Image (tube, rainbow, N blue to C red):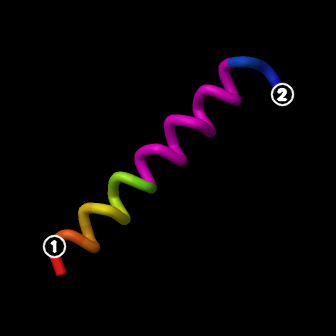
Amino acid sequence: MSDGDLLGVVLGAIALLMFATGLLLAI
């Protein structure tokens, strides 16, 4: 796995966490 792929995974995880947090706050 290259550094670019790892960065993509990290950014994807952060985006997913932010999305989930937004949903929880919206409820």
Q: Which residue sits at x=20%, y=69%?
A: 25
x and y percent of residue 20 in the render?
37, 65
Question: Label 1 sits on what residue type?
Answer: Ala
Q: How many marks?
A: 2
Quarter of the image with the C terminus is bottom left
Q: Which residue sits at x=33%, y=58%?
A: 19
x and y percent of residue 17 in the render?
43, 55
Q: Is residue 18 above or below residue 6?
A: below
Q: Are marks 2 and 1 in contact (CB under 8 Å)?
A: no
Kindly report which numbered mark, 2 or 1, lies closer to the viewer in this rendering: 1
Q: Is residue 12 above or below residue 4?
A: below
Q: Quadrant of residue 8?
A: top right
Packing grade of label 2 (10 A; few <14, some 14-19, many >=20) is: few
Q: Main secondary structure of the magenta part?
A: helix
Q: Is residue 4 above or below residue 22?
A: above
Q: Is residue 7 left or right of residue 5?
A: left
Q: Secondary structure at mark 2?
A: loop
Q: Secondary structure at mark 1?
A: helix
Extreme left residue here? Answer: 26
The answer to whether residue 10 is magenta is yes
Q: Which residue sits at x=41%, y=46%?
A: 15
Residue 16 shows which numbered tag? none
Question: Label 2 sits on what residue type?
Answer: Met
What is the span of residues highlighted in magenta in the rendered image? Answer: 4-16
Extreme right residue here? Answer: 1
Extreme bottom residue here? Answer: 27
Packing grade of label 1 (10 A; few <14, some 14-19, many >=20) is: few
Q: Which residue sits at x=72%, y=18%?
A: 3
Residue 26 shows which numbered tag? 1
Mark 2 = which residue?
1
Quarter of the image with the N terminus is top right
